[in-house]
Image: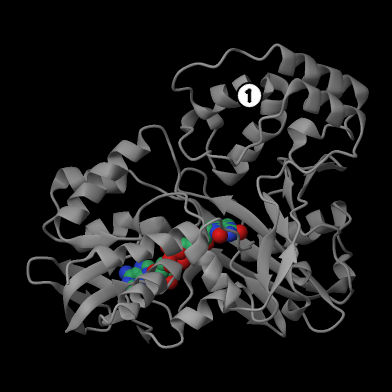
Amino acid sequence: MAEILVLGGGVAGISAAWHACKTGREAVIFEAKERWGGLLDHFMVDGFRFDNAVHFAFSSNEDYRKVLEMTEYITHKPEPYNYEQGRWLKHPVQNNLFPLPADDKVAAIKSFIERPDQTENPNYRQWLEQQFGAVIADRFPARYTEKYWTVPAEKLSTEWIGNRLYRPSLDEVLYGAMTDETPSTYYLQEMLYPKRGGFRSFLEPLAGDLDIRTGKRAIRLNPANKIVEFSDGSAERYEYLVSSVPLPELVQMIDISPDAVKMAASSLWATSAALVSLGFNCPQAGEHLWFYIYDKDIMPARVHAPYRKSPDNVPAGLSSLQFETYFSANSPLKSNADELTAHVIQAAEKMKLASPGDIIVSDFRVLPYANVVFDRGMTGRRDYVLEYIKGLGILPVGRFGLWDYLWSDQSFLSGKRVENLPV
Ligand SMILES: Cc1cc2nc3c(=O)[nH]c(=O)nc-3n(C[C@H](O)[C@H](O)[C@H](O)COP(=O)(O)OP(=O)(O)OC[C@H]3O[C@@H](n4cnc5c(N)ncnc54)[C@H](O)[C@@H]3O)c2cc1C
């Protein structure tokens, strides 16, 4: 029997077990996959390392910073870009309109000046129009929303925004329309990445001494008898259960869940990400660390350059790019692996990132859970489900356990809540 049984070996589960062990308690992690790391893990293809989508570390939290300091890292200044119709705009576009034709800038600025007043409880589209004016909203963030969140902006709430979207003054919009020598207004000043071993290396100092059992997918849970059953036929008893399993799946595992809870849980949905990862036989594919794509006829929403995160991610002198295409039950992926890969290769050529002849490595895979979707009313339904789970004595943690838009530091901190479990 495990005193504290942790489901999931991503950063949240690792943090939970690590914090438990630090206070002298016994914790065991059961991870469905053959490797721990979850979204922060990577995969190797012929000497090229690809993280599970773009990942950088940043945090104002002292505890998480201390964890990051245990690993040698590279500090990057965030300078993302935006691609639209053959143009490259600095990020965020609203105060970097410089590359647009004059007529487009005039229309964007006029609409910024005439933007509607703020209202109470707007949907995301209304919010975008109230911040940036309809022209910028429609052309950039609303279009991006359909690619990234897989729903029209009017279907989303605004609860997830936080400091993610910069709200410029009129002076900043004007200035950025006249020159590209604009100051950085990105919400982070620096982003960290391990010198060696991919993002997962940041977790190695924590995971090193933990009891992590891989290949253990929990499939059934009996909270009355405190027993978890696994897909390999084994079962474990526990005193306390910590779960980073996606909330809707956890509810399905519990036979006694009332229908109302099951219904609320099944209304929660997330996007998935199809990753096309390419390795190039040239030293510099693309010019940016990462960038966003607004064009509807290019399926990926975001691209990053693993070789720019760290040269350790590629064989000496070579380069790599990874393309993220989002889909969901609401907006299924329209292509199979080969079709999407061929589309990405064409798009890479169109965006002048690299020539197809330089490609020496190509990989396609899917992250089933990428971002939880904040459709309107979602947080109320989620909180109802979370109350039920907590009422069963289960501690939910992590991005999908808590069903929230958490960065890795927040997922880490959610695991620290294990310290509140009674001794
Ligand atoms: C595209 C993308 C980009 C991101 N970029 C950044 C970034 O730049 N910086 C940043 O800080 N954060 C970033 N994040 C967020 C970060 O990835 C998450 O906050 C964090 O990795 C979540 O960790 P977790 O442990 O909660 O979940 P996961 O990493 O998903 O871990 C959950 C684990 O549970 C396991 N599991 C699931 N079901 C079961 C089961 N039934 N039984 C046993 N095990 C199970 C899974 O296999 C998985 O290993 C990004 C996320 C995405 C999707």
Image quadrant containing the C terminus = bottom left
Q: Quadrant of residue 179?
A: top right
Say whether residue 80 is left or right of residue 24: right
Q: Residue at x 51, y 58 (%)?
A: 61
Say whether residue 55 is left or right of residue 286: left
Q: Which residue is drawn at 29% across and 40% down?
A: 381
Say whether residue 393 is left or right of residue 333: left
Front residue of 356 and 110: 110
Residue 397, image x, y percentages: 34, 60
Residue 16, image x, y percentages: 35, 70
Establish if 363 lies above or below 268: below
Image quadrant containing the N terminus = bottom left
Q: Which amino acid does label 1 sit on?
A: Gln
Front residue of 196 and 380: 196
Q: In which quarter of the image is residue 253?
A: bottom left
- State the SS at label 1: helix
Establish if 183 lies above or below 357: above
Residue 282, image x, y percentages: 89, 74
Residue occupied by mark 1: 131
Q: Hey, which residue is sitting farthest left in the picture? A: 224
